[in-house]
Image (tube, helix red, strand yellow):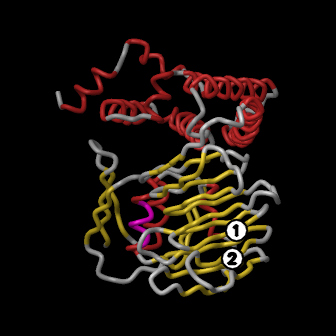
């Protein structure tokens, strides 16, 4: 017996023999299935890999359940407690059952309404909790610094103290006060997309490596990784952008797709425009490549999926363009490989290890 078979056998409890009878809501309600999706370990990875291989007819159902759980996890603020998560999941299951009674059995038919339900329910449940907590908050409560950080493979949706929303990308960190008083100041390292709640009395300020972006009510994206040029892109509304330590007058972006770039080493600030509005699609979990070389593709996939990629036999330049909305790593690699002519292997023992071999 191999070590993989042994670990799978240990992980395999008696009740798991009935997984072949499960439908979508059964998988969503199963605590060990949910634990595998949100907190995978080696034994659970081996078990589910072997189980899916042995029950291919359940593959689509399992992938649908996995996507719903990941979507719920992604759109939940990090401070949401387990009880609220359970309320949301219970409501989603009720939504699924209601759709089933209408005779719609296609996975696609109910995945989209459920995804919308996740967002709506989260807004209602957590919004109500935030409002009631905020109203009762003593004005003398101490103000502390809140730090939110994402490593590779993770993105998060964060509700700020004023009700504004920040979508934080992987390898990124933001810091802000637990309660805004005179202004709403955010410190950003990495990339984030902001949907700002209007409040003319409290300017919304984002400091990213010496560049200050100011908005009263708008939506914009900032990419500010350490050692790289800062990019600010406007989605809607109006913002001003200017160096923090400079007498230079801030510039104004007031049209969708407007772009500001800033180099902290020399303080140079330039204004232009993006060729399209793809620069913030990552916030909707859509991966976009534009004439990307393979170094960029490799780095992006490693950060997006938290994997380590080894590339072999690449002796030519690559320029790839493609868009992937909420797709698995395997699906993304398959599509790219059709164009760029390579094979790939995801290690069975360690799914974070990926090898790409060019023809």
Question: Residue 214 got which mark?
Answer: 1
Which residue occupies 71% across, 41% down? 119
Mark 2 to mark 1 CA distance (whole Å): 23 Å
Examine the rendered structure and indicate whether residue 43 appears above or below residue 119: above
Residue 75 in percent (x, y) is at: 63, 43
Residue 293 in percent (x, y) is at: 43, 78
Q: Which of 117 and 358 is in front in this view?
A: 117
* Residue 307 quadrant: bottom left
Residue 49 visible at all? yes
The residue carrying pointer 2 sits among few (fewer than 14), some (14 to 19) or many (20 or more) residues within 10 Å by Cα, namely few
Examine the rendered structure and indicate whether residue 87 appears above or below residue 339: above
Residue 342 in percent (x, y) is at: 36, 68
How many labels, in total?
2
Compared across the picture, whether 99 is left or right of 212 comes to right
* Residue 73 quadrant: top right
Q: Quadrant of the C terminus?
A: bottom left
SS under mark 1: strand
In the rendered structure, does residue 232 fall within the stretch colored magenta? Answer: no
Which residue occupies 61% across, 22% down? 83
Q: Which of marks 2 and 1 is in front?
A: 1
């Amino acid at each position: 017996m191999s070590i993989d078979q042994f670990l799978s056998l240990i992980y395999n409890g008696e009740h798991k023999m009935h997984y072949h009878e499960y439908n979508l809501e059964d998988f969503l309600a199963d605590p060990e299935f949910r634990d595998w999706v949100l907190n995978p370990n080696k034994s659970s990875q081996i078990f589910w890999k072997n189980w899916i291989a042995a029950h291919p007819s359940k593959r689509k159902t399992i992938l649908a359940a996995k996507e719903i759980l990941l979507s719920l996890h992604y759109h939940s603020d990090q401070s949401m407690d387990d009880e609220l998560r359970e309320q949301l999941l219970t409501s989603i299951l009720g939504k699924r059952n209601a759709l089933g009674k209408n005779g719609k059995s296609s996975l696609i038919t109910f995945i989209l309404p459920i995804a919308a339900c996740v967002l709506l329910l989260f807004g209602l449940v957590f919004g109500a909790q935030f409002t009631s907590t905020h109203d009762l908050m003593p004005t003398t409560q101490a103000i502390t610094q809140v730090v939110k950080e994402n490593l590779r493979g993770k993105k998060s949706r964060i509700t700020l103290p004023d009700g504004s929303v920040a979508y934080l990308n992987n390898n990124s960190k933001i810091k802000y006060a637990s309660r805004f008083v005179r202004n709403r100041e955010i410190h950003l390292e990495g990339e984030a997309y902001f949907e700002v709640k209007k409040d003319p009395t409290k300017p919304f300020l984002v400091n990213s490596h010496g560049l200050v972006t100011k908005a009263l009510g708008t939506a914009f994206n900032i990419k500010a990784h350490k050692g790289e040029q800062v990019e600010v892109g406007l989605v809607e509304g109006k913002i001003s952008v200017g160096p923090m330590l400079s007498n230079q007058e801030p510039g104004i972006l007031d049209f969708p797709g407007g772009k500001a770039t800033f180099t902290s080493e020399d303080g140079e600030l330039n204004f232009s425009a993006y060729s399209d509005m793809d620069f913030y699609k990552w916030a909707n979990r859509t991966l976009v490549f534009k004439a990307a070389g393979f170094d960029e593709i490799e780095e992006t996939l490693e950060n997006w999926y938290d994997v380590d990629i080894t590339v072999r036999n690449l002796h030519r330049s690559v320029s790839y363009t493609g868009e992937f909305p909420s797709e698995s790593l395997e699906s993304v690699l398959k599509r790219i490989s059709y164009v760029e002519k390579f094979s790939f292997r995801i290690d069975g023992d360690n799914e974070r290890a990926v090898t790409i071999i060019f023809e």
